[in-house]
Image (tube, helix red, strand yellow):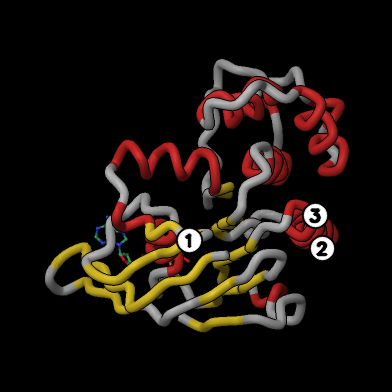
Amino acid sequence: MLATNQLTFAYTSDKRFAFPDVRCANREALLILGRSGTGKTTFLHLLALLLTPKSGSVTIDNTDLTTLSPAQTATFRAQHLGIIYQKPHFVSSLSVLDNLLMANYLAGKPQDKKRATELAGQLGFDGQLQKKTNQMSQGEQQRVSIARAMMNQPSVILADEPTSSLDDDNTDRVVRLLREQSEQIGASLIVVTHDQRLKDVFTNRVEL
Ligand SMILES: Nc1ncnc2c1ncn2[C@@H]1O[C@H](COP(=O)(O)OP(=O)(O)OP(=O)(O)O)[C@@H](O)[C@H]1O
């Protein structure tokens, strides 16, 4: 479960944001829609405490993240959050499989090759686990990024424009997978996007 309360943020004195309160229960999905530049990535980074809010709170499962130290925040993030960034950040010298297993390592959990292989199969890149990530197309990298976010069975999945580089068929596939996986592991799924194709798929929506 994720809930925010009166979150505000400022990059500079003339670039301020006051975000609406959002709530997303376990197994629920929430779409945050907005045009380019309205603050969607900023909001998502606040939810993950990658940015520190100026005021307000972010509560995930009964923990107010704004009360944690930086070290506690990093551990909490690795163990409880699955983040799909707008641009996937991979370790280019490692294979796709090792990039997936790194999520386990960062969370202090045993490396789970079985889960990595299963997720790769569900997302259609199980034949490419030994490749380097830069040998894959943008859309394929996006799917690896989704698999990586699912590796630790997180309680909250945050996805930043997960479908922006995908065609309609792969968009349907990715949205279905994100929803299936989050329901299966009991996670809250929060997607920020300007992709109007997703509007009809999510009943819970907030406009920024
Ligand atoms: N580090 C920064 N310093 C100053 N301003 C920033 C910084 N990062 C983002 N901004 C500004 O804050 C606003 C919101 O940026 P953000 O990336 O959150 O928007 P967005 O809705 O995700 O956009 P897009 O859909 O284009 O990715 C933009 O006007 C942007 O220029």
- Residue under label 2: 172
Q: Is residue 70 visible in the rendered structure shown here?
A: yes
Mark 2: is the Cβ under 8 angstroms from ligand 1?
A: no
Name the outermost residue toward the left.
13
Q: Is residue 141 visible in the rendered structure shown here?
A: no
Q: Which mark is residue 62?
A: 1
Cα separation, mark 3 vs mark 2, equals 18 Å
- Residue under label 3: 184
Q: Give the mark nearest the N terminus, 3 or 2.
A: 2
Q: Nearer the viewer, residue 193 or 49?
A: 49
Three-letter code for the amino acid on which mark 1 is drawn: Asn
Residue 163 in picture, x, y percent from top left? 67, 59
In which image quadrant can residue 5 be found? bottom left
Secondary element under disc 1, as helix, strand or loop, is loop
Task: Please name the residue shown 74% across and 52% down the image.
Answer: 185
> Which quadrant does the C terminus fall into?
bottom left
Three-letter code for the amino acid on which mark 3 is drawn: Gln
Q: Which mark is residue 196?
A: none
Cα separation, mark 1 vs mark 2, equals 33 Å
Secondary element under disc 2, as helix, strand or loop, is helix
Vertical arrangement, residue 188 with respect to residue 149, above or below: below
Vertical arrangement, residue 94 with respect to residue 38, above or below: above
Residue 90 in picture, x, y percent from top left? 55, 31
Cα separation, mark 3 vs mark 1, equals 21 Å
Task: Please name the residue shown 50% across and 39% down the image.
Answer: 78
Task: Please name the residue shown 29% across and 71% down the image.
Answer: 56
